[in-house]
Structures are given as structure tokens and as C-alpha cells.
Amino acid sequence: MSITQETLHLIVNPVSGHGKGAEFADQTIVPILKHLAIPHLIYTTTSPGDAGNIGNKILSSQTEEGGTLNVGIVGGDGTFHEFMEGEGVSDGQVRWNVILFPLGTANALYSSLFPPSSTSSSLQSYKSLIDSLPPLPHSEGTLYNLLSLFSFLTKTTPVYLPITQTTLSSPTGAVEQLRSHVVLSTALHAAILEDSERLRESHQGTERFKIAAQQNASKLFYASVTLQSQSSVEVEQWDPRKGDWVLPYSIKNTSQQSQTEFTIEGPFSYFLTTSTVDRLEPQFVISPLTSLNQYENQGYLYITIIRPLRDRFISQAEPEERKDKLTKRAFEVVGQAYSNGNHVNLTLSQEDELNSFELENKGKGEPVVEVFRCDSFEWIPSNDKGKVEGLESGNERLVCADGALHTIPQGGLAKVKVEDKKHGKGFYVFASVDPHHRGK
Ligand SMILES: Nc1ncnc2c1ncn2[C@@H]1O[C@H](COP(=O)(O)OP(=O)(O)OP(=O)(O)O)[C@@H](O)[C@H]1O
């Protein structure tokens, strides 16, 4: 078959998720493409990293220099990540129009673009298209997996996917460049990932994540963070009481701030940033304000922070009680991400005669979770760790980029930014008409 601009290149990972990618491509996707006479080619990944090689191959097959390539990813977030890491795939020469098929495990990007709660209404809007297709296994699960394809078939404008770029530096210069399309984290999130890998052999299933969370929830991570704005976007903080983005208001322990640079002193418990997703799993909405419809600018980094010493439940506790109290609080707060991201609405109690320090929902106090957006920041691990009696410190040099762990060199830092948007080039994904845009 000759390759044209219309050819849909399907990259199929046969082992992701429950290993059903190849079957799904054969039995569900291909019959639809054939029925609609859409030219397509199928590439099956044969090893870790192969999606990137396939991306290169597709790139070198393009007929028009600097054109648009249509690619379908049948797999999970890891498959997309490896595709994106292919030599040349990310360097902005072409525009990739991406159709996602969520055949992975977490499917963070897909479930952010198509929140499971809106499946029925999305399917309703594609009813006439679905009725025109060959007989499919019309279960809601199958149809849910086809929503990005339906978006492509109905010629919906795909949304730009801002990629996060991270540079790890030592005191003498840059040592490692990372690209992530889902998440970049440090502190608790990275520590859980590291420990859960260690526990993989001894503990099956999701049990190891729970154990790793228990092991790290009471740790403090010492660093300072400088939030910056390098392009036209401003550094802003979400105020759940106003339901709006405002100038940063909860950073108090720092000296002079300019409008374009704000320094946040740790210690931190939780620190996670994303430019694309509102959730890491279908129900774990950790960054509910993430919005993808940035028509004007290149996108934001949305940053979710917990600094436990802002919370008097922790800071005023007796040293011997602090560990248990911080663990309890961390689970209480982060657990609210499962309630449609309600953790960002929790506020610290202001006056508390009983000293119970219960959290309130959109109360008068400051939010316990600080949410910022900007276009770049630096995470600078502190060498001179302050000590808080009763609380251990974790490895503040550990960084997680889309699930892979990296270490900032001693004395170094991580510089994180949204990749520059090259006009009309880069990654565009077929999403629902209005993907998560709650945060305006
Ligand atoms: N033929 C293959 N054999 C073994 N591993 C493969 C093969 N093809 C791809 N892989 C590896 O499979 C891994 C898992 O894929 P992926 O991350 O898409 O699925 P997942 O982990 O189930 O889902 P998610 O990332 O959404 O949680 C990839 O990171 C890739 O390295």
C-alpha cells in the first residue's frame, strides 16, 4: 500500500495493560478503518523502547517534508512516552495528530481527555457515527476505548499537547534532559514509585503501592522551588474560595518577590507537576485544574504542593505524635483526589479552640494543598536540611518523569519548563470537544 498524508499509522503494544492491544486492533479498529476505507499501516512493538523506533520509521516514510502524520497509539502512557522519545519524533519537524486507544493500565492521558463520568454523553454525541459502523462488540467499554477515534472521524480539531522538559544539572552544568507527557514529580510521589519498585518481587498487585505510601507519607523533602514565568503567562495560584486563579498568596516565608518569580521554601511532602492531565488513573484526579484548551499560549505547568508545616495539626503536635499525624493527614488529603479532586478545596482551620485542626471544605483559611500554574520552575534540593523533631527526611534529589526515576546530582537542581510551541508542529491529540477546562 502506498503511504499518503491520510495514512493512519497504528502503533500496537501487544503487552501493555492486559495484553489485549493486538486483539483490539485486529477485531475492532481495523474493521472500522476498512469499512471507512481509511488507509492504515500496523506496527507492533517488539521490545521496550520500540515505539520510538517505529516513530522514526514513520517519520522517514513521510511523503511531504514538515507535514502532518496521523498516528494511533494502541497501548498505555508508557507506549506514548516511548513513541515521543524516538529520535526526531519530538524535535518539532512535523505535526503528529494522535489518536489514542487506552489499552494500558493507568491510561492517565486518555482518562483525562475522556473522563469516565462523561462517557454516556460523549457516546450520545457520536450516536449517528456509531450506527453507521460495522457491527462492533457494542459494549460501553469497547465504545469508550474508541472515543479518540470517533473524535478523529468526526473531524474534531485535535488539542495541542504541551510537553514538559526537565533538565537535571550538577553544579558544573546540565547532565540529563528528560521529556514527559504525563507527570513530573519529586517528594512523596517519586519516593512511592521508587519503593514500590523495590517491593515488586515480594508483593503482588497494588499492595506494594500501599506499603510504599505508608513508608513515605510522613517524610519531609527539603528543597526550595522558584516558580517563573518566561512567556506571556503569569505565575498564578488557585484560590478555591474564589474559584479562580489569582496572584500567589500563600508564600510568606520568602524575601522580595517579583511578579515573574516566586520562591517557595520547603520542606515539602507532596510535589507534582503536569502540563496535560488532570488525573493519573481514571478516578485519581490529582490535578483537577489542569486545562488543555490553551488556544493562545503554549500551555502551563500545573503544580500540586503539600507543605505540611503550614498545617498546625502537624507543626503544633508533640514531636512523638508528628509522624502518625502527618501520615494520617497525607492519606486524608491525597485520598480526596479520588473524590473528583476535592483535595484542592480543603482549607486549614483558622481558629480552633479545641486544637483539633480539622480541615474544612472551602472554609476561610488557606488551602492545605497549594496549586500553582506557571511555565517554568526550578526545584533546588537543600543541602542544609533543617530538622523537624519526630519527622524523617526523604530523598529530595529523586525525580519521576512519566514513571521513570532519575536523580539530581549532589549540589544540583532540576529546571522544568513547558516546551516551546512551534507553530502548528508537535503533538496534537483527538480529545472530546471540550477536554478538562474547569480551571479556565
Ligand atoms: N513486545 C514487547 N515486549 C515487552 N515489552 C514491551 C513490548 N512492547 C512494548 N513493551 C513495553 O511495555 C511497557 C508497558 O506499556 P504501557 O506503559 O503502554 O502499558 P501499561 O504500563 O500497562 O500502561 P500505563 O502506562 O497506561 O499504566 C512499555 O513501557 C514498553 O517498554
Image: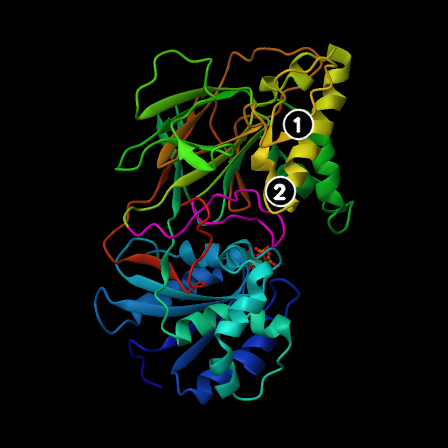
Determine the residue positioned at 46% across, 73% down.
150
Determine the residue positioned at 73% across, 28% down.
328
Q: Is residue 206 left or right of residue 53?
A: right
Residue 193 lies in what quarter of the image? top right
77 up-or-down from 128: above or below: above
Question: How many neighbours does mark 2 have within 10 angstroms: few (below 14), some (14-19), or many (20 or more)?
Answer: some
> Residue 337: which numbered mark, if any?
2
Instruction: State the image coordinates of residue 48 (x, y, percent, origin top left).
Output: 53, 58
Residue 23 lies in what quarter of the image? bottom right
Instruction: State the image coordinates of residue 110 (x, y, percent, origin top left).
Output: 52, 59
- Read off the magenta span: 275-295
Work out how far the residue at label 2 is from the one at label 1, CA to CA, in angstroms.
15 Å
Residue 107 lies in what quarter of the image? bottom right
Pointer 1: what residue?
A: 359
- Look at the image and say whether residue 387 sits in the magenta stretch: no
* Main secondary structure type of the part rendered in magenta: loop
